[in-house]
Amino acid sequence: MHSFDSVISRLRSNGFKLTPQRLAIIKYMENNKTHPHALKIHKELKKKYPTLSFSTVYNTLNMLESIGEITSVNIFDEYLNFDPETKPHIHFYCKVCGEVTDIFLEDVDGLSLPIDEINGNLIDSAQIVFKGICKKCRGREQQ
Amino acid sequence: MHSFDSVISRLRSNGFKLTPQRLAIIKYMENNKTHPHALKIHKELKKKYPTLSFSTVYNTLNMLESIGEITSVNIFDEYLNFDPETKPHIHFYCKVCGEVTDIFLEDVDGLSLPIDEINGNLIDSAQIVFKGICKKCRGREQQ
DNA sequence: ATAGGTGCAAAGGGTTTGCAGTCGG
DNA sequence: CCGACTGCAAACCCTTTGCACCTAT
């Protein structure tokens, strides 16, 4: 996702209206590394906007995704997680604490993406989720 | 998934009852490379077992997953796909025809899994979905 | 005989939709 | 002002659950 100001001007120049709800959602997503799902965003922002509806949250998230400012990923089975990081990257899901963190390709030896072709199939995107136990939880589990 | 006969004896020796519905579902999944979802399985098998219920399909699939005979993956956002291939592998989803095919690690240069640790995080499983255009559709699209 | 499985319908959880009222441009 | 957006409730889709009946062992 671009900076708050850039997103705002992109919306403005594309004829989108800048409602308080949209601004709040954009601000919430900017630099957000927690991969929130829509219901969480709704719950959080409802504190400040008590009448905020699900439809507005979903509409705004879908709109931001459609213009490429955020992406959505199925990290768990249950629901969609939204991510302001639009550069290709990998998600790591910790089975103990439930946190989802980003891993960038530079950090992984032996893994070179994008691979653009396998067995004649053209590849244009990849969704990679590693699951396991995160550094913090590993330390905590040692007795 | 093991062979039909092996699955049957595993169930028998574990005290599971061998109902016609279960046998049909197991037979349907054996060597199935289409990554079907529960509703598709239900629809298909309903032809032969008109009273087959959703609960039976889901119960059986969940049972088979719990004993490790099949796995479930979220290839699309919408629903869970079941796969009799339990060896770690990658899914390729074709955006044109919608088919999902398996890719094995041997086929991918530069990709060596399992990677067991990244940044101190212990990794025990990975879900990898490549999306793009499959060989068949690439040929078909050239004009 | 009996535990476990089936089928039905209803409930559940996340997401979308329809529509009247509202507000940003 | 007007068209796009909001909020509400209902609808939606896939999956699970509750429960009476049934069936494999």
Image (tube, coloured by chain):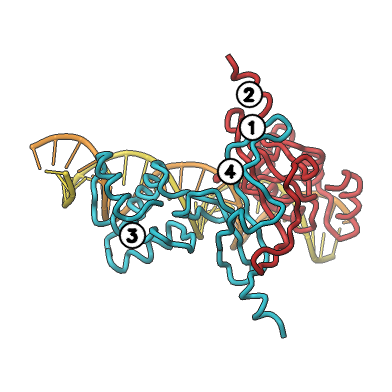
Chain colours: A cyan, B red, C yellow, D orange
User: What distance separates the C-alpha of mark 1 from that of mark 2?
Assistant: 8 Å
Q: Amino acid at mark 1?
A: Leu
Question: What residue appears at the point 84 percent right and 50 percent down from the top-left corner?
Answer: B18
The image quarter in which residue A42 lies: bottom left
4 or 1: mark nearer the eye: 1
The circle drawn on residue B138 is: 2
Q: Secondary structure at mark 3?
A: helix
The kind of residue on which mark 2 rests is Arg
For badge 4, the amino acid type reads: Phe
Relative image position of residue B110 (x, y in whole percent): 73, 46
Between discs 2 and 4, the one toward the N terminus: 4
Given residues B19 and B139, the one toward you in this image is: B139
Q: Chain of mark 2?
A: B
| Dot 2 crowding, Cα within 10 Å, few <14, some 14–19, many 20+ | some
Q: CA distance from mark 3 to mark 1?
A: 36 Å
Distance in Å between CA atoms under marks 2 and 4: 21 Å
* Cα gap from disc 4 to disc 1, whole angstroms: 18 Å
Q: Nearer the viewer, residue B30 or B74?
A: B74
Give the number of the disc on residue A27. Answer: 3
Q: Are marks 3 and 4 on the same chain?
A: no
- Label 2, secondary structure: give it: helix
